[in-house]
């Protein structure tokens, strides 16, 4: 389609008649693969629960695009209190890319971000990758809820492991109650999360879960009126180590 090499941008896909659904699939040298769903709407505030800056070799980039004509200023506030990033978006430059190893100046390796736009709605995705040829992508959240359902998490399930990360996207601090399918008596509360903060729960670190576990998780905010947003990351370490392709995925919880 005439795009130059090393292009990093965004696209607007419009239909003159029937509704559309859009999926973006990405591949890169070395076997990295990523995929995400297109957006049919945005918001002036968007949340991303997990960004990485040298987190167990993972790095991440944040891509933000405006929706609609005109100009807007986008501010990205990081949950570790490091210096916010700013993008000035216009019709000529409707999107921006923030690469965490250069855009983020804080000490945290894993952190969340809150994206605010001064006028127009925006959408955002996070791309993450590591030198082991693993890559993942997820979409930013425009809203949350008091409870998040995670349909599939795993601990050594045919070699698959998962971790999930939840962000407090409400205005009040809250604990999170973690309850695994089949292990309700082992449900527990996390430490309190400040507004905008996030926490990662790594399933191989849950001692009460047996190897081979595959089930669901319910995450519930403890504070009245609190809202959360969660993502799940999935990896297969053995097959990745054998060089059998990119064995890494991510999905947004509902």
Image (tube, rainbow, N blue to C red):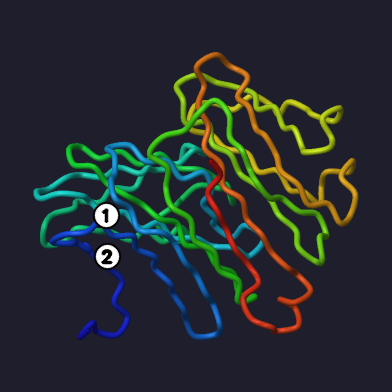
Which of pointers 2 and 1 lies earlier in the amino acid sequence? 2
Contact between marks 2 and 1 (CB within 8 A): the answer is: yes
Q: Which mark is residue 214?
A: none
- Residue drawn at point x = 69 percent, y = 64 percent: 235
- The secondary element bearing badge 2 is classed as loop
- Residue drawn at point x = 54 percent, y = 36 percent: 167
Read off the residue under disc 1.
65
Of residues 25 and 120, the one drawn nearer to the viewer in this rendering: 25
Is residue 78 found left or right of 4 in the rendered image? right
Read off the residue under disc 2.
10
Of residues 68 and 97, the one drawn nearer to the viewer in this rendering: 68
- The secondary element bearing badge 1 is classed as strand
Of residues 127 and 253, the one drawn nearer to the viewer in this rendering: 253
Coordinates of residue 171 in the picture (x, y in percent):
45, 21
- Residue drawn at point x = 44 percent, y = 61 percent: 36
Quarter of the image for residue 136 reads bottom right
């Amino acid at each position: 389609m005439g795009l130059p090499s090393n292009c990093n941008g965004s696209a607007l896909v419009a239909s003159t008649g029937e509704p559309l659904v859009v999926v973006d699939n990405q591949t890169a040298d070395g076997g990295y693969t990523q995929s995400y769903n297109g957006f049919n709407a945005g918001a002036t505030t968007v949340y991303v629960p997990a960004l990485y800056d040298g987190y167990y070799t993972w790095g991440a980039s944040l891509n933000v695009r405006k929706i609609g004509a005109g100009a807007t200023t986008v501010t990205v506030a990081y949950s570790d209190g490091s210096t916010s990033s700013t993008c000035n978006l216009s019709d000529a430059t409707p999107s921006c890319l923030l690469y965490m190893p250069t855009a983020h100046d804080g000490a945290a390796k894993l952190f969340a971000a809150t994206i605010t736009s001064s006028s127009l709605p925006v959408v955002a995705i996070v791309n993450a990758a590591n030198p082991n040829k693993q890559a993942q992508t997820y979409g930013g959240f425009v809203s949350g809820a008091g409870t998040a359902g995670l349909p599939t998490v795993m601990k050594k399930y045919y070699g698959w492991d998962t971790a999930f990360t939840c962000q407090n996207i409400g205005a009040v601090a809250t604990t999170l109650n973690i309850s695994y399918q089949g292990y309700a008596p082992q449900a527990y509360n996390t430490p309190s999360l400040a507004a905008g903060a996030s926490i990662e729960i790594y399933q191989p670190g849950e001692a009460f879960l047996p190897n081979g576990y595959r089930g669901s998780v319910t995450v519930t905010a403890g504070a009245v009126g609190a809202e959360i947003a969660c993502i799940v990351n999935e990896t297969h370490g053995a097959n990745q180590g054998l060089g059998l392709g990119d064995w890494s995925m991510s999905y947004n919880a509902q």
